[in-house]
Image: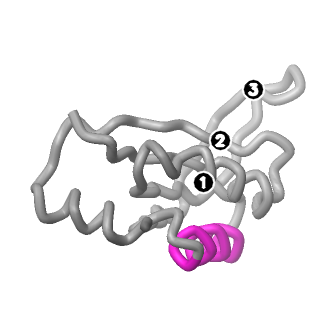
Amino acid sequence: MTDKVLVLTTAGNEMEAQKIAHELVERRLAACVNIVPRIQSVYRWEGKVETAEEYLLVIKTTKARSVEVQGAIRELHSYALPEYVVISMEGGSAEYLKWIEDSVR
């Protein structure tokens, strides 16, 4: 187990996904953000089942920085309730994990 995590969030359009990704990396809150375009999401919101096309952001950071990542997502996001899920990394190549650590200092 490492102190590195993946944070998942979604955005409603490519421009917002790009803005969030660039800000997180620029602020050194994330080493890397992958943007997976055009996913289909089905969810319940305000009592109704909704379907939307979204962009998935896969954010690589450390557990220590994940709280700041959450704050930045809330600040930058247009959704009233943006997705914020943290997944612990069980492992990975030592070089890659060090790169994440060095990138978010």
Q: Which is nearer the N-term, disc 2 or disc 3?
A: 3
The answer to whether residue 21 is magenta is yes
Considering only order in the chain, which callout, 1 or 2, is on the residue closer to the N terminus? 1
Alpha carbon of mark 2 to alpha carbon of mark 1: how far? 12 Å
Instruction: Give, as a three-letter code, the residue at label 3.
Output: Arg
Q: Which residue is mark 1?
A: 69
Are the two marked residues, 3 and 1, in contact with CB atoms closer than 8 angstroms? no
Q: CA distance from mark 2 to mark 3?
A: 13 Å
Q: Which mark is residue 44?
A: 3
| Disc 3 versus disc 1: nearer the observer | 1
The image quadrant that residue 12 belongs to is: bottom right
In the image, 31 versus 39, the foreground residue is: 31
Highlighted range, magenta:
14-26
Which quadrant: the C terminus?
A: bottom left
**Residue at x 67%, y 58% (from the top left corner):** 11
Quarter of the N terminus within the rendering: top left
Residue positioned most to the front: 105
Mark 2 against mark 3, which lies toward the viewer? Answer: 2
Query: What residue is at 12 percent from the left and 64 percent from the top?
Result: 95
Identify which amino acid the numbered label 2 is placed on.
Glu
Q: Which mark is residue 83?
A: 2
Q: How is the image coloured?
A: one colour
> Would you say residue 70 sits in the magenta stretch?
no
> SS for tag 3?
strand
Image quadrant in which you'd find residue 16: bottom right
Q: Residue at x 53, y 63 (%)?
A: 29
Q: Main secondary structure of the magenta part?
A: helix
Q: Earlier in the sequence, mark 3 or mark 1?
A: 3
**Percent x, y for residue 82?**
72, 45
Q: Residue at x 45, y 55 (%)?
A: 58
Label 1: element kind: helix
